[in-house]
Structure formats: structure tokens, C-alpha cells
Image (tube, rainbow, N blue to C red):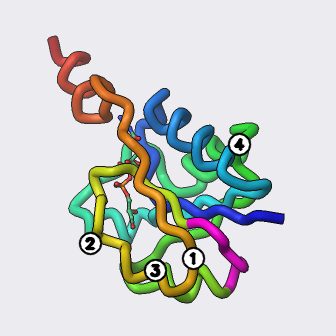
Amino acid sequence: MKRVITYGTFDLLHYGHIELLRRARSMGDYLVVALSTDEFNWNCKQKKCYFPYEERKRMLEAIRYVDLVVPEENWEQKSTDVDKYNIDVFVIGDDWKGKFDFLKEKCEVVYLSRTPEISTTKIKQDLQK
Ligand code: C2G
């Protein structure tokens, strides 16, 4: 069984996220999503989530491509996660290209193209119009 992992905030969930999850899952048989906690988002990513962690987790768990959702609590856990969840492939959007190449010692690292023209920022801006 080929196991894939990806990381993110996934708030407000939109089709760009779904496309990432669909493509990530297609690279293996099992997809783990490490979901940024509210504290990690606020303290380390300066992101204030609209939906709290438990709600974001519930939404991700309802997506057919997602097999397991675990908390992302810090920047340093990725290497441990690869071992902990027996990961074969690390996948993330290419806005992070090169940032996680250190994981290549342990697993395949894939940067997928982001879905253009959609982002949470754009959604919020459009709703202001
Ligand atoms: N994404 C995408 N297309 C978009 C928007 C997002 O493919 N239009 C991808 C991002 O590249 C990322 C995933 O969807 O791989 C989740 O996006 P975010 O929730 O914005 O994740 P981010 O804040 O980048 O968190 O440790 C890594 C971080 O937790 C990644």
C-alpha cells in the first residue's frame, strides 16, 4: 500500500484544495492529511481560521480522497510524520516548491501545480464587493 501525506490549513475549503487532495490521493492508495491546528495557524502562519480545527477536520474527513486527518502542530513534525505514518510520498502545492526537499532522504517529494484563480483571499475579497 502506497501511503501519501499532505499538509495544510484548508480554510475556507474550496475546489483548489479538493483538486490538490484528488491528485495527491491518485499518487497512492492512502492519503493522510496533516491539518494545521488553530494554534499553529495563528502562532506560526499568521492565519486566523474562519472554521475551527474540529470543523475543518470534519469537512476533510467527508472528502472521498482523504483517509486520515491528523494535526499539524509545528513546522518540524514532517520528518517524524513520514516515519510515524509509513509515508512513501509527500505532496504539496508548488507554492512550497523546494521548501521540503530535505524529506527526499525518506520519501518521494512532489510539488503539484496550484489551481489558478481560486484562493481563500480571493473568496473573501469577492464577497466584500
Ligand atoms: N492549493 C492549491 N490550489 C489553490 C489553493 C491551495 O493547490 N488554489 C493547495 C496548496 O498549495 C496546499 C493545499 O492546497 O498544498 C492547502 O492549502 P493551504 O490550506 O493554503 O495550505 P498552506 O497554508 O499552504 O499550508 O506545513 C505546510 C503548511 O501547513 C501548508
Q: Which residue type carries mark 4?
A: Tyr
Looking at the image, residue 1 sits to the left or right of residue 106; the answer is right
What residue is disc 2 on? 44
Magenta stretch in the rendered image:
84-89
Looking at the image, residue 102 sits to the left or right of residue 117; the answer is right
Q: CA distance from mark 3 to mark 2?
A: 20 Å
Mark 4 closeness class: few <14, some 14–19, many ≥20 residues within 10 Å? many
Q: Which residue is located at x 63 percent, y 41 percent?
A: 59
Q: Is residue 4 magenta?
A: no
Q: Position of residue 106 (x, y in %)?
A: 56, 84
Dot 1 or dot 2: first in sequence order is 2
Callout 4: helix, strand or loop?
loop
What residue is disc 3 on? 103
Q: What number is the disc on residue 107? A: 1
**Which tag is nearer the camera, tag 4 or tag 1?**
1
Q: Say if 117 sits above or below 86 in the image.
A: above
Q: CA distance from mark 1 to mark 2?
A: 25 Å
**Which tag is nearer the camera, tag 4 or tag 2?**
4
Q: Position of residue 95 (x, y in %)?
A: 27, 51
What residue is disc 4 on? 65
Q: Which residue type carries mark 2?
A: Cys
Please state which of residues 76 and 120 is positioned toward the viewer in this rendering: 76
**Which tag is nearer the camera, tag 3 or tag 2?**
3
Q: Are marks 3 and 1 in contact (CB under 8 Å)?
A: yes
Dot 4 or dot 3: first in sequence order is 4
Q: Position of residue 117 (x, y in %)?
A: 28, 23
**Which tag is nearer the camera, tag 4 or tag 3?**
3
Callout 3: helix, strand or loop?
helix
Mark 2 closeness class: few <14, some 14–19, many ≥20 residues within 10 Å? few
